Amino acid sequence: MQVVETEHWEAPTIPSRWHVGKAAVESERQAGEVSRKVAEALLDSVEREALVMPEVSGEALLRRASRLLDLAYWVGETDGYGNQVLATRAVGIAATALARLVADTSFDLGRVRVELGRCRPPFDAPSRRAKVMNIELGRDALPTDRISTDAELQMVWRDHALAALAAYNAVKTAQPGLPTDRTLRTQQNRNDTPTSTDRVSTADSVSDSAFRGDAFDWCPKPQTTRRCWEHGRHTEVLATTRPVGRVIRAEALLLVRDKLGGFPEVRDTVDDEAVLSGAQRAFRTALRLNVGLGLSSQALLAGDTYDQIRAGRYVDYDSELARQWERRQEGTTGSSPGASTSPLVVPRAVDVPTPTVPEPTAAGSTTTNNGVLAACLAIAVLLLVFGSRKFEW
């Protein structure tokens, strides 16, 4: 990064694999492929940092986090799909490291606070991501002037994707033997299809394989940044899922430390009623006593983060995804790699033993008659109570 800053180099625009193969003109493809190879090498370096940083602490950890943020800002200032992916990954790893430093009460917060403030970069704004998507598509499909929140960006992208799927399914339905996509049918069954024509024009989306590609170009699980690099997952990366959770956790932990001047004593017990950890309950109680109500959600999030850091289990978002996937795979016997870990319940015939009826006796006959009378009486009561009510199914 020193050479980059000294020579004032600008980061190249890093397109997606989809853009290079389908949207770029011939003269742009070679440059796009070269920039993607450079970005791939940078991403490998970032991933190595994610492996090393859990073993580092103190000043060394802060320096590494700062260098990652320098890289994120250098790459992210240039509008490009890969630029966003790489910058976001670097920010997430840096925020994880900064949360560990916030939890260390012996470490001064001055520089940590500055670096944590950099974890909300301007290039992560929804309108900026929409602009990058338009560059990817080669036309202004997303109205950047009307997108100011993540929810608005998600809605516009979703409408485009559903419109593209509808067009694709219409073609497939007209050709017997070709399967239609299940995603759209599921959305239609839930009455979740777009009804507004203000956000998206169906005609504009018909030829957009970029939107349809999100449904057919699945990234294998665990869907980490590195594994999905070659899959062009526009939806996960830029439109819907934003891995900013580690930033939010670090900010919540900093809020608790600022409000309380440190962290309260934590007893390693669990609240049976709310299923809270010791740190969650201690943080919430201390904030209520010293600050007042209104910070419960931050206290619980900070408490959970603090528990993970104390236990040495707090890692970046992608590493946590990989860890969870490994645990699921270990708990699934006989499953192939990449297969779903959810148990498949297959209805099958069950041998039900035929109940044996005792031979009628005098005493048995009396018992049976009493049971019949009791059943009739219960039915009569139910009819009296519920007979006048109207049930809607």
Image (cartoon, rainbow, N blue to C red):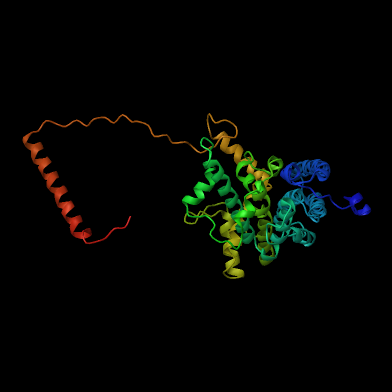
Res 306 visible: no
Specify the farthest residue to the front: 174
State the image coordinates of residue 71 (x, y, percent, origin top left).
81, 51
Give the left or right position of residue 6, taking residue 288 as reference: right
Q: For this rendering, which residue is in front, 238 or 44?
A: 238
Relative height, residue 227 to residue 146 (above, below): above
Tally of numbered tags = 0
Relative height, residue 84 to residue 292 (above, below): above
Q: For this rendering, which residue is in front, 306 or 215?
A: 215
Q: For this rendering, which residue is in front, 32 or 90?
A: 32
The C terminus, quarter of image: bottom left
The image quadrant of residue 264 is: bottom right
State the image coordinates of residue 212 (x, y, percent, origin top left).
62, 46
Res 3 visible: yes
State the image coordinates of residue 208 (x, y, percent, origin top left).
66, 49
Q: Residue drawn at (6%, 36%), measured in percent from left and top?
A: 362
Q: Residue drawn at (14%, 49%), measured in percent from left and top?
A: 376
Specify the farthest residue to the left: 362
State the image coordinates of residue 275 (x, y, percent, origin top left).
51, 53
The image quadrant of residue 318 is: top right
The image quadrant of residue 265 is: bottom right
Give the left or right position of residue 192, taking residue 69 as reference: left
Give the left or right position of residue 201, taking residue 7 as reference: left
Give the left or right position of residue 285, taking residue 234 as reference: left
Q: For this rendering, which residue is in front, 157 or 257?
A: 157
